[in-house]
Amino acid sequence: MEKTTKNLKAFNTFAIDCTAEAYFEFTSKEQLPQTAQIYAQYPKTHILGGGSNTVFLNNRISGAVIRICNKGIETLEENDRNVIVRVAAGESWEGFVRWACKRGYCGIENLAAIPGTVGAAPVQNIGAYGAQAEDSIAWVESFDMARQKFIQTKKEDCRFGYRNSRWKSENKQELIHSVVFSLNKNFVPNTDYKALREYMERNPEKNPTPERICEIVTEIRNSKLPDPKILGNAGSFFKNPTVDKDEYERLKSKFKDLVAFEEQNGYKLSAAWLIESCGLKGKRFGNVGMHEKQALVMVNYGGATGKQIADFALRVRQTVKDRFDVDLQTEAHMVE
């Protein structure tokens, strides 16, 4: 792994112009011992995938940046009902979904067109259109750079939650180098999510394939979300907050059109509705704003710094807090 100085604008979907003074590319498991040396040498070590959930706060990144670039998809087991595949962390998530759907493997087709890498999927427990990464993950393979130890984390030990996992705020010393998925061969479309269900009702199809669902989800996403290649963004910037029954009833009595969904542990509020109700959908401040079609998506209109994005996020959170007394949490990962 060769150390270089690297501008990271092309490696984060917000298109933030910043520089890593100690940049490394991880391309194979043979380099894992070297990652331990890097981890010990620098005060901070940042693991970078596709940069699709990353906000670099400073113009120059302190510590080391290791970008995950390894590739490969390997079939471990296969029978009439399912297939077990090991996928390198540096593979494109979108590319992997299309690879699976093309072969008739199902379980991740609703997660089509999500930018980023496979290695980031378990960290964020990415989810969309009624599916989450945890639904198909069998185990995660990583390397503890501090203890120089290989780790295999079974699904039940990943501590998956809503946009959360054991790697989200802890275990930062673990470099995920591959993820193992269990995919089904007997396809039953998951069309419970409202937008997907309504699309299928308007455009009924007999026996849609995983590949067809992948195409439909991609079409729906593209109609609502900005292309990061054109307008810098990191997808949904805020999480949908969860409140208890008493808090939900308080809000519902005051705001009759409140959008919320009942869950086992309370009610999940629509962060998009909260933000839009504050008049922030499509609102722009300088080079930063909330997208005109999706209130959850913050966009870089060009030239925005990480600090400007963070400041605007704080403004949004405070506005929602003042109006609803609800705390929004950022889904995007802030890197100093």
Image: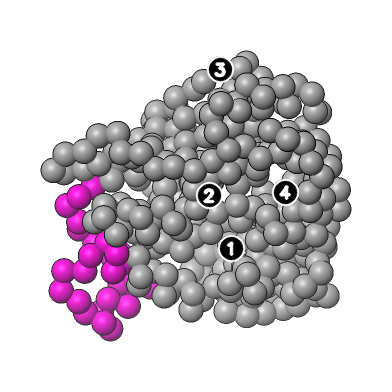
Give the Cα distance between marks 4 and 3: 27 Å
* Vertical arrangement, residue 259 with respect to residue 334, above or below: below
Q: Are marks 2 and 1 in contact (CB under 8 Å)?
A: no
Amino acid carrying mark 4 in the image: Met
Residue type for callout 3 = Lys
Q: Is residue 190 magenta-colored? A: yes
**CB atoms at circles 4 and 1 under 8 Å apart?**
no
Task: Report the residue at 32% width, 53% height from top.
Answer: 100
- Check residue 149 in the rendering and tell me which mark sits there, or answer none: 3
Residue carrying label 2 = 117
Q: Earlier in the sequence, mark 2 or mark 1?
A: 2
User: Is 160 in front, or is 325?
Assistant: 160
- Residue shown at the point (51%, 20%) measured from the top left: 150
The outermost residue toward the front is 2
* Upstream in sequence: badge 3 or badge 1: 3
Which numbered circle lies on residue 334?
A: 4
What is the C-alpha distance between the residues marked 2 and 3? 23 Å
Q: CA distance from mark 3 to mark 1?
A: 34 Å
Residue 31, percent from left and from top: 61, 28
- Structural distance between the alpha carbons of marks 2 and 4: 18 Å
Q: Which residues are magenta?
A: 184-213
